[in-house]
Image (cartoon, rainbow, N blue to C red):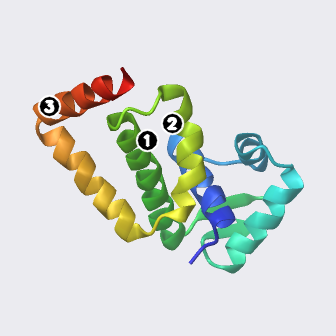
Amino acid sequence: MPTPSMEDYIEQIYILIEKKGYARVSDIAEALKVHPSSVTKMIQKLDKDEYLIYEKYRGFVLTAKGKKIGERLVFRHDLLEEFLEIIGVEKENIYEDVEGIEHHLSWNSIDRIGDVVTYFKEDPKRLDDLQQIQMQNEK
């Protein structure tokens, strides 16, 4: 299992490759707000652990294992953002809140949050009811 730090890198690499078709050290460093040398060290570790294939001076690509984990990490992030939005967390707090909690939840918890999101999305009246409760509690 990747560490939380490894997950951040895999997720970012996956996102960049999906958007641009490639991921460069400088792009990853900028996105994660770290030094390029830190990215290079992590890429070497991810290569050793077979999440990606790295060739010095040529770049890197995610392995099937890396892609699968990257896809799941992006799903987890998006699901948590959607969940926080549904329960009424202010938009300007959602990204930072997700970054703070995503590595601390089990996949079982993620699955249950997915069930809650599905529950509210299946019937807009449920979401309206929740928003009514939230408005009453804010008074």
Instruction: Give the SS element for disc 1.
Output: helix
Q: Which residue is mark 1?
A: 81
Mark 3 is surrounded, within 10 Å at the Cα level, by few (under 14), some (14 to 19) or many (20 or more) other residues, namely: few
In the image: residue 36, left or right of residue 104: right
> Distance of mark 1 from mark 2, alpha carbons?
6 Å
Residue 22 in the image, given as x and y percentages of width and height: 62, 47
Could you tell me if residue 98 is visible in this image?
yes
Instruction: Identify which amino acid the numbered label 3 is placed on.
Output: Pro
> Distance of mark 3 from mark 1, alpha carbons?
18 Å
In the image: residue 94, left or right of residue 27: left
Where, by quadrant of the figure, is residue 9 drawn?
bottom right
Residue shown at the point (26%, 28%) measured from the top left: 131
Q: In the rendered structure, are the residues bearing label 1 and label 2 in contact, judged by CB atoms less than 8 Å apart?
A: yes
Which circle marks residue 124 in the picture? 3
* Quarter in which the N terminus is drawn: bottom right
Q: Which residue is mark 2?
A: 94
In the image: residue 111, left or right of residue 41: left
Q: Earlier in the sequence, mark 3 or mark 2?
A: 2
Q: Earlier in the sequence, mark 3 or mark 1?
A: 1
* Above or below for 2 versus 85: below
Could you tell me if residue 55 is visible in this image?
no
Instruction: Give the SS element for disc 2.
Output: helix
